[in-house]
Amino acid sequence: MSEPIYILAIESSCDETSAAILRGTQVLSNCISSQIQHAKFGGVVPEVASRAHQSEIYRVVAQALTDAGISLDQLHAVAVTQGPGLVGSLLVGITYAKSLCMALGIPLISVNHMQAHIMAHFEEKDSPKPKFPFLNLTVSGGHTQLVLVHSPLQMEVIGETIDDAAGEAFDKAAKVLGLEYPGGPQVDKFAKQGDAKKYKFAEPKVKELDFSFSGLKTSLLYFLRDELKKDETFIAKELPHICASYQNAIVSYLLKKVKMAIAKVSVTDVTLSGGVSANSELRKQFQEWGEANGISVYIPPMALCTDNAAMIGIAAYYKFLEKDFASLDIIPLGRMPLV
């Protein structure tokens, strides 16, 4: 039997400081420190985020090692998110990872954050796994992409947003509605009590498989402006229905694009990934569509939907097998194409 491979993974691309220990693709620990200090600003402040990473990263790594029952001298590699993300935040994780690699004499593995979201589906569990090639819809606060996944290391973007991302559309709507930060989960919560068909919002018109969400946000803004002129208590009275209708508009639009992509690439397996894949209505509609059309739909567990180091470690394991190691002079990349 071959020796098990232990990898320490670090994720610090935005406002989550996370460390995980993996044995192959088996997650032994996955520790996350969420930065609640951004709530008072209504969004992530890059400088605040990077300073919070600096104060938390040592503790989170130490906790991950303790929870996994693994010591530093058992590690075979350290994996870290190189991008995309906030440069200052990424720099904290990369610097820490480099230091460990130099001290321990083990290789560094650079991971693309978006690739890692997709590879979260390959956590070592008894649950079914998607078969290559498959179609992935990534939906997060900063990205909305349709990706044709040929193998763990070969992925092709076939559609993406030309402006805002789906997660941003949720968060901006929540802010306009006066909901707490982070806004996406708040919209989802109130939508459960509302009628998704009560109000209509303009569907974005973008060619082929690309996405746009700026027009949808504008549609909501003008709708609220007009209704508030008639009744200044409109939002308070109709909040659940507004949330349900707006959420349904986003989910229906995402599903429409996936259907278009399926017709073009002829795959039978579809996966969701990214923070917005935790949205209950998105999960529900995709599962129902898959069951009705003979499509196998795979959605990661909640713990692997949002930013976390376990997904970084899963992606890194496949790079380790190919000896695809990074130089110690790598730099953080705010933009990092998925290749």
Image (spheres, grey):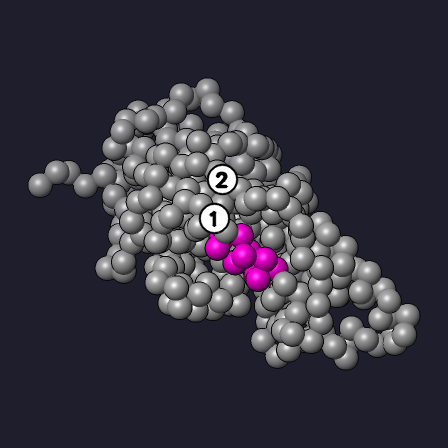
**Residue on which disc 2 sits:** 158
Mark 1: which secondary structure?
helix
Q: Pick the residue in front: 106 or 59.
A: 106
Q: Residues within 10 Å of mark 1 (few under 14, many from 20)?
A: many
Q: Residues within 10 Å of mark 2 (few under 14, many from 20)?
A: some
Whether tag 2 and tag 1 are in contact, CB under 8 A, the answer is yes
One can see residue 218 in this view: yes
**Mark identifier at residue 89:** none
Q: Pick the residue in front: 252 or 318.
A: 252
Estimate the x, y position of residue 127 in percent, counting from the top left: 27, 60
**Which residue sits at x=61%, y=44%?**
207
**Residue most toward the right?**
229
**Residue most toward the left?**
1
Whether residue 254 is in magenta: the answer is yes
**Which residue sits at x=67%, y=57%?**
203
Query: How far is mark 2 from mark 1, CA to CA?
Result: 8 Å
Mark 2: which secondary structure?
strand
**Residue on which disc 1 sits:** 261
Identify which amino acid the numbered label 2 is placed on: Ile
Identify which amino acid the numbered label 1 is placed on: Ala
* Closer to the eye: label 2 or 1: 1
Q: Would you say the magenta stretch is mainly helix, strand or loop?
A: helix
Whether residue 35 is in magenta: the answer is no
**Which residue sits at x=77%, y=76%?**
236
**Which residue sits at x=67%, y=50%?**
205
Q: Which residues are magenta?
A: 250-259
Estimate the x, y position of residue 68 in percent, counting from the top left: 29, 51
Left or right placement of residue 282 versus residue 244 in this view: left
